[in-house]
Image (cartoon, helix red, strand yellow):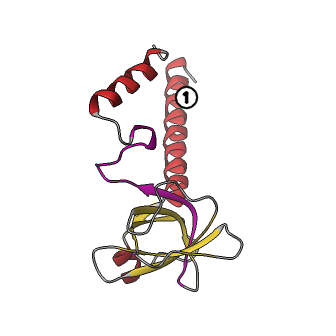
Amino acid sequence: MKAKQQRMVLVVIAMVAIIGAGLMAAWALSNQANYFYLPEQMAEAPPEVGQAVRLGGMVQEGSLKTEADGVTVNFRVTGNGEAAIPVRYSGILPDLFVEGSGVVAEGSLQANGVFLATNLLAKHDENYVPKELEGMTQQQAAKVAADTTVGLQ
């Protein structure tokens, strides 16, 4: 083979390898993707049992129950409609997690219809104020913020 033909063969092999690696990566990522569901969507077309998904909505008022172990909680997530999905979570709850607040639960739907959460993300509204800044005026809060960023520069 001439040098030009060898280069062409190497280019073709490299292109096939790159395309193959890209297809394998895309296939692996599609299997690991976390899909986001609202309670209405999950009730209407539930994901496969055990598939990793995210469930987002509001913690239903009066639904939060802590079990005897003190770590496991059961609650219901609702959306704009009438659907409410029961959720079970074992672990430390986020500070902002309360009834009536927004939540994103990462986990999977079980065969019994309960969403088993492995991670909870509490959402806050646009009026959120950190505990350290509660009761301060805007000027006092700005001074605290300026004092804490001085050491970072």
Which residues are the magenta region? 113-133
Q: Position of residue 64 (x, y in %)?
A: 51, 75
Residue at image location 44% in from the left, 79% down from the top: 62
Q: Which of 131 and 11 is in front in this view?
A: 131
Residue at image location 62% in from the left, 58% down from the top: 92
Residue that numbered label 1 is attached to: 10
**Circle 1 residues within 10 Å: few <14, some 14–19, many ≥20:** few
Residue 126 lies in magenta, yes or no? yes
Residue at image location 54% in from the left, 80% down from the top: 114
Which of the 4 image quadrants contains residue 146? top left
Q: Position of residue 66 (x, y in %)?
A: 60, 74
Q: Which of 3 and 100 is in front in this view?
A: 100
Kindly identify the amino acid type of the residue bearing the numbered disc 1. Leu
Indicate the quadrant containing the N terminus: top left, top right, bottom left or bottom right. Answer: top right
Q: Which of 30 and 101 is in front in this view?
A: 101
Q: Residue most toward the right? A: 69
Name the secondary structure under disc 1: helix
